[in-house]
Amino acid sequence: MPAQLTSIAPQAPPRARRMPGGLLSLLVLSLLSPASLSAFELRGGSLVWVGAPASAVPLPQPAAADFDGDGSIDRLTIKGGLARVTSGDRNVWQSPGAWNVTEGLVTDLNRDGKPELALLVWRPYAPWPIDRFLPHGGRLLGFQDEAGASCHLILIGWRDGSWREVWAGSALADPLFHLAATDIDGDGFEELLALEGRYSVKRSTPAGSLTLWRWNGFGFNLDARWSGRFSQFQIVRSADGHPLVLVQGLWR
């Protein structure tokens, strides 16, 4: 049975206030408007509004690493739903044709000390094989959009001399739209932040939640969920070294 992302009780969403437009100079082009822009820091499992930082540096989300240890850099590109890893002018890995890869970054979310690709994948819905033998199967039946595609988080890495799936989650109960990884709580390990939507609405619709996921040794736990209508977010580092979450949208 494949591992899956599991949920725990979310934290209550914080109240947010509008940030001044001067903070716009801190952002990359993914955040285009200062409207409803808020800056938060994770404290005790909750996002706390911290006001406009005097200065901050966007934390890049890596798309390259030396996966196989040969001294050359392997680079991830995603175009038209196809993910490729190239080393120099060589194509060393590409995603299966049935996958529609919408986002990806280089991380170590599973904390094994080796880089992996964290890919956000849409692919045709498939139930767990055991469901066909259970009296009430189809537990994942609703985890798909109207076209029959479900959303998955999949980790790809170089292991034992070849590229392979390091970990693949079952169909998510609610799809994710935008990913970022950073050590948000200062424990020395990366956590995953993501916008979460619904299968019943278009992917371009603002997401209903900002979520925080943490590796538990076998898969991911949902540590916190903050509700609202969010169009984008970005991780930056403030002048005092703390990671901040810049969110564009409205909090509930």
Image: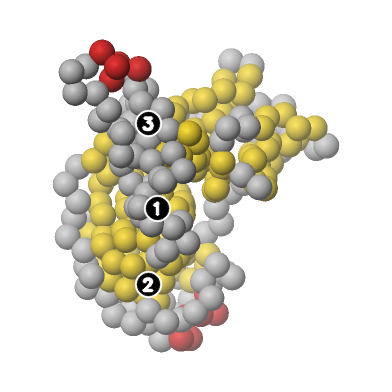
On-image quarter of the N terminus: top left
The reply to whether residue 229 is in sight is: yes
How many numbered marks does the figure carry? 3
Residue at disc 1, secondary structure: strand
Residue shown at 42%/63% (left/top)? 205
Q: Nearer the viewer, mark 1 or mark 3?
A: 3
Name the residue tied to disc 2: 249
- Crowd class of label 2 (few under 14; some 14 to 19; many from 20; radius 10 Å): many
Which residue is disc 3 drawn over?
170
Of labels 1 and 3, earlier in sequence is 3
Is label 2 in contact with label 3 (beta carbons under 8 Å)? no
- Residue 18: percent from left, percent from top: 34, 82
Q: Would you identify the image quadrant in which residue 228 lies? A: bottom left
Identify which residue, 212 or 124, lies in the foreground: 124
Q: Is residue 199 above or below residue 97?
A: below
The foreground one among 214 and 133 is 133
Three-letter code, disc 1 = Ala
Vertical placement of 162 versus 82: above or below?
above
Q: Which residue is mark 1?
A: 194
Of the residues shown, which amino acid type is indicated by label 2? Answer: Gly
Earlier-in-chain disc, 2 versus 3 = 3
The residues bearing labels 2 and 1 have C-alpha atoms spaced at a distance of: 14 Å
Distance (Cα) linking label 1 and label 3: 17 Å
